[in-house]
Amino acid sequence: MTEAFLLAQAVEFDVASNIAFAIISIVMLYSAFKMVTTGNVVHAALYLVIVLAASAAVFILLGSDFVGATQILVYIGAIIVLFLFGIMLTKAQLGDDDSVASEKRSMGALVGTLLFVVMAFALVDTFGNDEINFGDPEPIAFTPSTVDASDLPTPVREALFISADAGEVELTQAQFDTLEPEVQRRVPGAEVFGNNKQIADAIFSQYIIPFEAVSVLLLAALIGAIVVARKE
Amino acid sequence: MIGLAFWIETTFRSAGGLAAVLLPAGPLVYLYLFKMMSFMQSRLGPMEAGPAGSMQLLAEVGKFLQKEDLFPAKADRIVFAAAPFVVLVSSFLLVVVVPFGPDAWFVNLDTGVFFAMAVSSVSVIGILMAGWASASKYSMLGGLRAAGQLIAYELPLVLAVMGVVIQAGTLNMQDIVLAQAEGEIFGFGGIGNPFIITQFLGFVIFMIAMQAELTQPPFDMPVAESELVTGYITEYSGMRFLLFFIGEFATAGIFAMIASVLFLGGWWVPGIDPDSNLFNILGPAVMFAKVLGVTFLVFWFRITYPRFREDQLQKLAWKVLIPLSLLNIVITGILKVAF
């Protein structure tokens, strides 16, 4: 159970990634702590920016840059900006604000601890034995086809020793396997099954109904907000 | 390609990133802000420092470095001091995904354009920080105006890019350049298929939204000098003011790079094989030429048009640009499926 907490279980122990992860987590934990203890609302929002940026960095570290970029776009670029916008339009005094959650702290700490225990248990129980592979090469699918040699990109032709005026050539799986991944993705008929494609495939096939339901829900919330805010 | 040690490669790429952010800013200020603006207003512009005033920029930087770094008495010192750096970091993160040649890139992310659009929104935080921490009403109003404007124009910016992404079939900036280089227009591949031809509407929307994102006139309500002194920059002096100033023009250069990658074929010029090693040397120069072209348009509009009103600005974004860019996506999608 204890080793489940360590990344050392990963097949290839990636020192650089682990050091980066440690630095990011320390910054993240410190900012998260300061966020709930600081006496100034704007400071709290700015600490939240650091926390969210750090979690985006962790996603990017795990090779999931789409989720990381989404985290930045949605949370930092939109939600926090609206937070700051709202705070600054209403009350944004400089210096400490004594009314910020003084007597509710112990309650908050209790909820936080409970949430931590539940989530930590759920995560360790579910993913405790999974192995993390940093920087796995993306799988590239290939369907053998006949193409005109002049249509092939130069690196592909050079690697396979095909001259530009060879006319119609047949590309086989065996030839494809000898290529470097950087060159493989340039071959006509090759399809990269990267993170983006996997996420897109999952959202628009397996999870299409929840996805559409969420967008309708958001639309309803949007219209509701306008109705509530506008008093004729 | 020669194999280099990881840290050497990283050092090279970091130095390249610094150069790519800071180098275009100087020529842009001198060529357009000092000289073109002066000629358009029938005056000579700076003439004393160096031949035709070309050293004026160094003189300006020297002047700002000597000035005192003032903090307003009631300011939130840490947030006030950090704000210009947040804006600058946003520019540095943007340049990371821009390719300058077949192998001359910083990071070849699969989500290139999407990442660029995401990090471009970080600068809003810096501007809000500056506006709030200055403890001044002008700064505060400027910061809020800037945030409202940047949120409104982020949408058309992202939606305009979608057309290019659908047509190229990829988010990767390098692959978008290659898609244009290897593309054909009705079977004629002589000039490739720069997306400015097929995505002209997208290009126009992108340029307008970019002008607003850069808060260049006619979209300069956040710094409107006749109403707000200089908005969120009002209380800044010396080095920190200079950082904001550099950030403004560096970001203009980087947005122009992104525009030229998306619509003008990036580092590629017609007539040379895009896989040729020559482009690792020629690419940055080609990019710079295209950046000068795109920023010429930006500054031309900056100098020509008077400022919008706040309501006109919001109307333009929500009632004109966003519907048009959605229309562009629908048309591009239909044509993509049809052909």
Image (spheres, coloured by chain):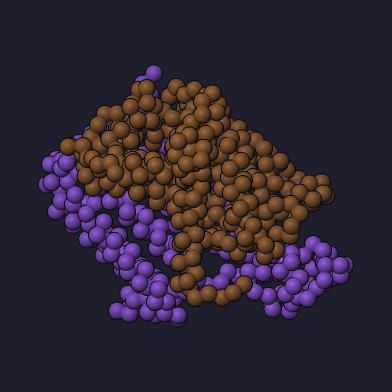
Chain colours: A purple, B brown
Query: In the picture provided, is B95 more to the left or to the right than A205?
Result: left
Query: In the picture provided, is B135 more to the left or to the right than B104?
Result: left
| Residue A126: quadrant of the picture | bottom left
The x and y percentages for residue B86 are 36, 48
Closer to us: A113 or A60:
A60
Q: At 36% from the left edge and 68% from the top edge, which residue is drawn?
A: A21
Q: At 43% from the left edge and 24% from the top edge, which residue is drawn?
A: B310
The x and y percentages for residue A200 are 57, 56
Q: At 67% from the left edge and 65% from the top edge, which residue is drawn?
A: B277
Q: Quadrant of the C terminus of chain A?
A: top left
A232 up-or-down from A143: above or below: above
Q: At 45% from the left edge and 72% from the top edge, which residue is drawn?
A: B7
| Residue A167: quadrant of the picture | bottom right
The x and y percentages for residue B83 are 32, 45
B148 up-or-down from A43: above or below: above
Q: Quadrant of the N terminus of chain A?
A: bottom left
The x and y percentages for residue A79 are 38, 43
Query: In the picture provided, is B307 more to the left or to the right than B301?
Result: left
Q: Count every numbered label the image shows and give the total.
A: 0
